[in-house]
Image (cartoon, coloured by chain):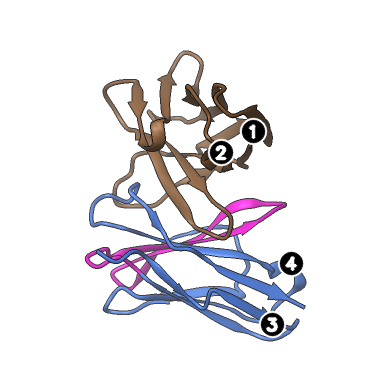
Chain colours: A brown, B blue
Amino acid sequence: AQSVTQLGSHVSVSEGALVLLRCNYSSSVPPYLFWYVQYPNQGLQLLLKYTTGATLVKGINGFEAEFKKSETSFHLTKPSAHMSDAAEYFCAVTRGNLNNNDMRFGAGTRLTVKP
Amino acid sequence: KAGVTQTPRYLIKTRGQQVTLSCSPISGHRSVSWYQQTPGQGLQFLFEYFSETQRNKGNFPGRFSGRQFSNSRSEMNVSTLELGDSALYLCASSPPGLADEQFFGPGTRLTVL
């Protein structure tokens, strides 16, 4: 079975600082990896995903993530935090079975951005 | 294209009652998945429906059930509600052949008193 672990349930950064949210995965097959963002009282919105090919993936709102097989990691970064980035972020993994939803989520990381 | 819609957005019930939540997927999407989100357990997969058939199920008791209609709309039902069922219930739909492309609705916030 596949799973993800998000390191740090809360991360606080200053506006303009680098954002780094950590995610490590476990999977018996090449994984598909995702980052979602959730704003208060809303559903999840896909930020970016890695399936195959280029290991550096760019997403919406200036976020990007790099798939590192040797480290089993898929950390999310943004060079400069904005107040509007304050939200909860979820890392997720699937086995890439396109006909069956087997997505598993991490526990989430709440990002706070200080002025 | 309209997004995934869920009704109602908020619901208050008492222990022992039952509840039905509704989800309308994005037009053309035939897969609908349900998740329960709580502060303690995080996001947990409930079940997935495709073409009116349940094709995947999480580890929840039989009090949690669902169905899907021919127009792909889905409902989930929770019977004999317990305090621990208080949660945000999220629905997500996927286009055909792309089960990993999930589009989430805003959720239904269920409070059990």
Going from N to C along the chain, the mark reached first, 2 or 1, is 2
Give the crowd class for mark 2: few <14, some 14-19, many >=20 residues within 10 Å. some
Considering only vertical position in the picture, is A99 above or below B29?
above
Which label sits in the foreground, 1 or 4?
1
Is B71 rendered above or below residue A47? below
Identify residue type, mark 4: Gly
Residue indicated by mark 4? B84
Mark 1 or mark 3, which is nearer to you?
Answer: 1
Chain ID, mark 3:
B
- Apparent side of residue B38 relative to residue A70 in the rendered image (left or right): right
The residue labelled by disc 3 is B13
In the image, which is nearer the foreground, mark 2 or mark 4?
2
Question: What is the three-letter code of the residue carrying label 3?
Answer: Lys
Q: CA distance from mark 2 to mark 4?
A: 34 Å
Residue toward you, B110 or B34: B110
Residue A40 shown left or right of residue B83 in the figure = left
Q: Residue furthest bottom?
A: B17
Magenta highlight on residue A98: no
Q: In the rendered image, which quarter is residue A107 located in?
A: top right
Q: Is residue A99 above or below residue B8?
A: above
Q: How far apart are labels 2 and 3 at the CA level?
A: 36 Å
In magenta, the rendered stretch is B25-54
Q: Nearer the viewer, mark 4 or mark 3?
A: 3
Whether residues under marks 2 and 1 lie with C-beta atoms below 8 angstroms apart, the answer is yes
Q: Residues within 10 Å of mark 3 (few under 14, many from 20)?
A: some
